[in-house]
Amino acid sequence: MNQDTFLWRQVHPDWVHEGRPTRQTFDPMGKKEISVSDGDMISAEDVWSKHVHTFNRKSVGVLSVTVADCEDNELSVRPDPVDNAPEHVAVIYPEAATKTQIRAVSEILLDRSLQHGWKYAAENQARPRL
């Protein structure tokens, strides 16, 4: 990975409100880290297919941020390969980050991802608006 590497983030249908992705897409929801996939190792379409068909999880599509987007906001990015997902990456929020700080950073990452645009959207679903 380098600064320009896209990190693919699945968008769960519950994270879409009035047709638009919400900041929950990049909120670690109490865990202090989010799971993404290394865009240098797998395409957005392939990671979506794997997420939905192999892992049987829901996703309306794939948004992305870059490694630089994360590091610019004081988030650590590290490879975190797991069984059946060598492309898995952890984006880690600082341990001392408050809920308010996490909310602010997740909003920034959402904005950055919307600037990058959809990298893949499920064909059988309406593409949520940006």
Image (cartoon, rainbow, N blue to C red):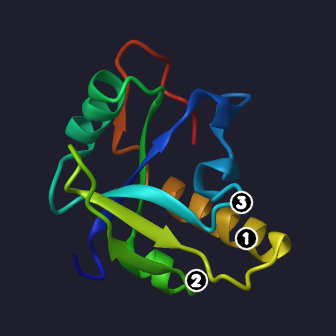
Instruction: Identify the residue at image location x=38%, y=23%.
Output: 56
Q: Tell me the CA gap for discs 3 and 2.
A: 18 Å
Task: Identify residue type, mark 1.
Answer: Ile
Q: Is residue 38 visible?
A: no
Q: Is residue 74 left or right of residue 40?
A: right
Residue pointed to by mark 1: 102
Crowd around label 2: few <14 · some 14–19 · many ≥20 (10 Å) = some
Instruction: Please say if 123 is above or below 83.
Output: above
Residue pointed to by mark 2: 73
Depth order, front residue of 56/59: 56
The image shows residue 118 at horizontal and vertical percentages of 41, 43
Q: Residue furthest right?
A: 100
Instruction: Identify the residue at image location x=27%, y=70%.
Output: 5
Crowd around label 1: few <14 · some 14–19 · many ≥20 (10 Å) = some
The image shows residue 21 at horizontal and vertical percentages of 62, 41
Instruction: Identify the residue at image location x=66%, y=82%.
Output: 95
Residue 68: quarter of image: bottom left
Quadrant placement of the N terminus: bottom left
Q: Which mark is in front, 3 or 1?
A: 3
Number of marks: 3
The image shows residue 98 at horizontal and vertical percentages of 81, 77
Residue pointed to by mark 3: 30
The image shows residue 122 at horizontal and vertical percentages of 37, 24
Q: Tell me the CA gap for discs 1 and 2.
A: 10 Å
Instruction: Please say if 92 is above or below 94.
Output: above
Task: Identify residue type, mark 2.
Answer: Asn
Q: In this view, does 46 lie to the left or right of 110?
A: left
Q: Which residue lies furthest to the top in this view?
A: 124
Mark 3 or mark 1: which comes first in sequence?
Answer: 3
Instruction: Identify the residue at image location x=64%, y=69%.
Output: 108
